[in-house]
Amino acid sequence: MELSLAICAGLWYWIARTQVGYTLHAILCQPLVMALPFGLIYGNLSQAMIMCKYSNVYLGLVGNGGNLPAE
C-alpha cells in the first residue's frame, strides 16, 4: 500500500512539475484534485476530502510573504 502511494505521488509530482500545459499544471496542483486519487488509494475518500478542505482554508488565509489578505 505504501509503495503504491509513493509511486503515485512521485508520478503525480513529476507530471505536475513538468508543466505540460498551462491548464494541466493549474489543475493538477490544486489540493482538491490531488486529494481524490490519494483518497481512493487509501480507501478513505471522505477523510481525504476533509483534509483537502482544511488545507484550502489554510492556503486562503495565509498570504505570500507573511502578509494577510485584505478580505
Image (cartoon, grey):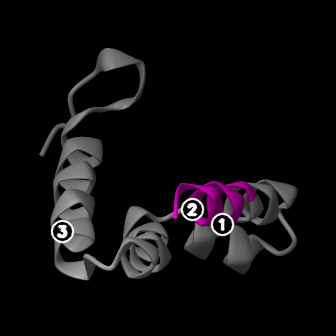
Residue 14 relative to residue 12: left or right: right
Q: Amino acid at mark 1?
A: Cys
| Quadrant assignment, res 11 | bottom right
Q: Amino acid at mark 3?
A: Gln
| Quadrant assignment, res 13 | bottom right
In this view, 43 is above or below 10: below
Q: Nearer the viewer, residue 65 or 6?
A: 6
Q: Residues within 10 Å of mark 1 (few under 14, many from 20)?
A: some
Eye-nearest disc, 3 or 2: 2
The reply to whether the magenta stretch includes residue 52 is: no
Kindly report the distance in space between the C-alpha atoms of the residues bearing marks 3 and 2: 16 Å
Please give the name of the residue rendered at 29% of the width and 45% of the height, measured from the top-left corner: 59
Q: Residues within 10 Å of mark 2 (few under 14, many from 20)?
A: some
Q: Which mark is residue 5?
A: 2
Extreme residue toward the top, this view: 66
In this view, 18 is above or below 61: below
Q: Which residue is mark 3?
A: 47
* Marks 1 & 2, CB-CB < 8 Å contact: yes
Kindly report the distance in space between the C-alpha atoms of the residues bearing marks 1 and 2: 5 Å
Residue 55 at what x, y percent from top left?
A: 26, 50
Q: Secondary structure at mark 1?
A: helix
The reply to whether the magenta stretch includes residue 3 is: yes
Kindly report the distance in space between the C-alpha atoms of the residues bearing marks 1 and 3: 18 Å
Earlier sequence position, callout 3 versus callout 2: 2
Q: Nearer the viewer, residue 22 or 15?
A: 15
Q: Which residue is mark 1?
A: 8
Q: Secondary structure at mark 3?
A: helix
Residue 66 at what x, y percent from top left?
A: 31, 17
Magenta range is 1-10
Q: Nearer the viewer, residue 34 or 42?
A: 42
Residue 62 relative to residue 28: left or right: left
